[in-house]
Image (spheres, rainbow, N blue to C red):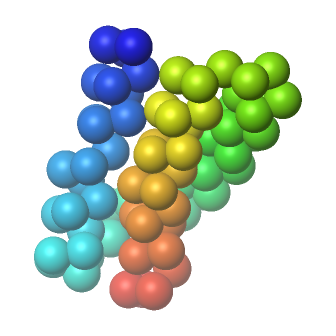
């Protein structure tokens, strides 16, 4: 649970910074597209095996990573 909390929370500062500054010039579109896809797949896997920590960690991480990806696309 500690690992899930730390890796999930790690996205929050970047997501907040991107939305406040409206700057995404140093963020890779390809990397965040792959990351959001991977997180989505982990979330689906967690749902299929009914693993609550996996579901919760990836659901929250997906929100933060998706916010960064949306900002990258929106603030070009």
Between 33 and 16, the residue placed more toward the observer is 16
For residue 44, above or below residue 28: above
Query: In the current view of this chain or complex, which residue is farthest to the right?
Result: 48
For residue 2, above or below residue 20: above
Between 48 and 6, the residue placed more toward the observer is 48
Residue drawn at x 53%, y 22% is 53
Residue drawn at x 68%, y 38% is 43
Image quarter hosting the N terminus: top left
Q: Is residue 35 left or right of residue 9?
A: right
For residue 61, above or below residue 47: below
Residue drawn at x 69%, y 46% is 40
- Asked if residue 26 shows in the view, the reply is yes
Q: In this figure, what is the number of numbered marks?
A: 0
- Residue 30: where, in percent of width, then height? 60, 56
Between 26 and 35, the residue placed more toward the observer is 35
For residue 73, above or below residue 12: below
- Residue 76: where, in percent of width, then height? 42, 85
Q: Is residue 41 left or right of residue 9?
A: right
Instruction: Give the quadrant of residue 59.
Output: top right
- Asked if residue 34 shows in the view, the reply is no
Q: Is residue 9 left or right of residue 43?
A: left
Between 48 and 37, the residue placed more toward the observer is 48
- Residue 2: where, in percent of width, then height? 32, 13
Instruction: Give the quadrant of residue 67.
Output: bottom left
């Amino acid at each position: 649970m500690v690992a899930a909390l730390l890796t999930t929370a790690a996205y929050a500062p970047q997501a907040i910074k991107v939305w406040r500054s409206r700057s995404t010039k140093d963020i890779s579109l390809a990397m965040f597209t792959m990351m959001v896809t991977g997180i989505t797949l982990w979330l689906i896997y967690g749902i299929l095996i009914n693993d609550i920590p996996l579901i919760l960690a990836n659901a929250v991480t997906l929100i933060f990573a998706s916010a960064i990806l949306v900002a990258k696309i929106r603030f070009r």
